[in-house]
Image (cartoon, rainbow, N blue to C red):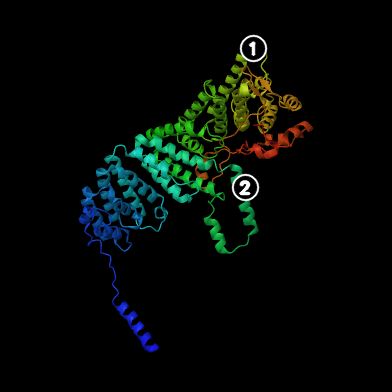
Amino acid sequence: MSTSSILKKRGSSVASSTETRVGFKLPTADEVDVQMAFKGVNTMDSNYRQLVSVLKSADTDDDALVRLLKRIKNCAPLIERHNDEVLECVLKIELLKRSIHVIDAFAQLACDMVYIHPVFLRNVFVTLLHTFMSPDAISKETPQREEKLERLHELFKQLFKLVPTAPAHLVEVLVAVFPYMKREGSQQASLVGHLLRMTSYIPDHRLELLQLLAHRALQIDLHCPKDEIMDAEDDAKEDDAMEEGGDIFEMEKFKSDADRMQHALADILDKVLNEFYLYFQQHCNIRDGDLSKLDWEKTKVLFKDFLTIFDKIILPTHKCCHLQFLLFYLCSFRPAALAVAFLDYLWKKVQNPATSSVIRQASAFYVGSFLARAKYVPLSTVCASLSLMCDWAHNYMASLNDGGFCQPQHDVQRHGTFYAVCQTVFYVFAFHHKGIASGDKGLQYLRDLNLEGLVMCPLNPLKSCLPAVVKQFASIARHYQLVYCYSVIERNQRLALPTASCDDDGVHGGDIVLDAFFPFDPYLLKRTGKWIEPLYRKFEKTEEDQVLDDEPEDEEDEAMCKSPSCVAEMFSYGTSPGFKRSLSYGHHR
C-alpha cells in the first residue's frame, strides 16, 4: 500500500469522527424534573445532577430561575440532608446580580427550608451576611441596589419571627464569619451598617449586637496608634510636595482622595465608625444636625447601651484612640442630661474604693479630657466638677491626717487615684481658666478651690503629674496669684531620682509619674472628623499664656522640659494637652 493511500484513509477517518461527534445539551430550568431529583436515592441520580447543573449555570435567566426556585419550594418536604448540594447551589446564587423577583423567590424558599429543617438557618445567615459585604452591596452600579437590600432585611425579619432563637444564632454566626480587620474597608463598613440597622427590629439582642460591633471596631482601633497615623499622613504630605505641578488629572484624583487616610487600618476604622455616626443620626431622628425632633426615648436607651459598652469594653482598654468618641458625640444630643450622666458615671467610678486603682485613675482621666474638650459642656458644669474634685482631694488628705498614721508621703501606688484627680483639676483649669476668671466672682471661685492646699500637701501631686500639665498649670496659677509652684517644682527636680517605698503588704512602688493619658485628645480620622469637629474644643493660647511662655526659664526648668526620653513616649497615646511638644518628656511606666 502506498504512503499516500495510508494518509488519505487516516484523514477520512478523522473527518468521519468529527461529523459523528455527539454533544451534551444542558436541560433548561423548566425541563428539569425537580420532584424526581429529590425522590432519587442518591445524589448521582441523573435528575439530581441536572438540577444541580442548572442551578450552577450562569445561563439560567432570572424568570426561569424564579420558576425553578418555586418548584423547589413546592418540593421542600422531600428535601433531606443528603440534598445539601442543591441547597448549597441555591445559597450561592448571587442575589444582588439577579432581579427583585429572584430575591423574593429565594426568600420564600429559605423560609420554608428553615421552617422544615432549622439546621439550615446558619447557612442562610452566612449567605445573607456575605451578601451584605459583597462588592455588589456597595457598588452604585448595582441595579435597584437599595430595594434589593431592603428585601434582604425583610427576609431577616421573617426568619426572626419564624425561629424565636434566630437572633441569638445570628450573633453566634457573626462571631465566626466577621471579616478579618484588613478586609476592604467599604465592605466591612457595609456589613456594620446593615447590622446596626438590624438592631431596630431585634431590640432584645440590640446590646449584644452593638457590643460585638464595638469590640470589632476596637480591634482595629488598637492597631491604629495616633503616632503611626500622623507619621503616615506626614509621609504622604512630603510625597505630595515632591510631586507638585502634576497635571489636572492628578489634581482631580487628589480631590477625590481627600478623605482617605494614609494609614490603611485607620482608613478602614474611619469607614466603619462612620456607620455608627450615621446610625446615631437615623436612630435618634436627627436630620442635618437638627436636634429639634430628637427622639428622646430612643436616645436614652441608646445612651444606656453605649454606656454599658464603654464600661465593659472601652474604659478597661489601654491605647484606645477613637472609639470613645462615639459616646462623646452621643452626649452632645442633650448635654444637660447625657453629658452630666456620663460625668456622674465616671465620678462614681473614681470615688468607689471597691473599683480597681487602674479603672479609678482612667475614669479621672476621662473626666478631665471630657470637660476640657467638649464644647457643649457648660461652664457651670465645669465649675461644679472642679469643686467636686477639689473637695474630694482635700477630704482625702484630711482622712490621711486624721487616721493616726505617720506623715503621708509621695507614693503613686498607694495614692494613684489622688494624683489622677489632682492632675485632672490642673488640666481642666488650664483649659478653662480664662472663662472662669472672666465671670462674676470668678477669681474668688478659683481661690475657694484652695489649689495651694493641694500643691503644697505632703503627697506632692506636682511630682506625679505629667510635666506639660505641671508647666502650664504653674504658669497660669502664678498669673492669678493662686499658688506659686516653682519652689515645689525645683525641689522635685533635685529629688528626681525614683525611690522605692514598701507598703504594708511588702509591695514596692518606685514609679514617680502617673501613667496618664488624655482619651479625648485631637481626633485624627478625616471622614468621621466632620461629626466631632463642631463639638470639639482645641487648646487656644490666650495673650496671657503667650506672655508666660515667653518668660525666661532658669536652667532647672529647661532641664525638666528636655529630659532625654523626650517626646516619643509622652505622645504615644496622643497625650498632648494642647501645649508645646517641647515641654514634654517621657513618663515612667
Q: Position of residue 34 (x, y in %)?
A: 22, 56
Quick one: SS at disc 1?
Answer: loop
Res 460 seen here = yes
Q: Quadrant of the C terminus?
A: top right
Identified at 63% across, 60% down, the residue is 244
- Which residue is denoted by mark 1 in the rendering? 405
Which residue is outermost to the top?
A: 404
- Residue 334, quarter of the rendered image: top left
Q: How many marks?
A: 2
Lower position in the chain sequence, tag 1 or tag 2: 2
Which residue is outermost to the front?
A: 1
Quick one: SS at disc 2?
Answer: helix
Q: Position of residue 234 (x, y in %)?
A: 63, 49
Identified at 46% across, 39% down, the residue is 214
Q: In the picture shown, does residue 52 fall above or below 152?
A: below
Taking the image as shown, residue 289 lies to the left or right of residue 540, namely: left
Cα separation, mark 1 vs mark 2, equals 50 Å
Front-lying residue, 550 or 411: 411
What's the amino acid at mark 1?
A: Phe
Q: Position of residue 353 (x, y in %)?
A: 54, 20
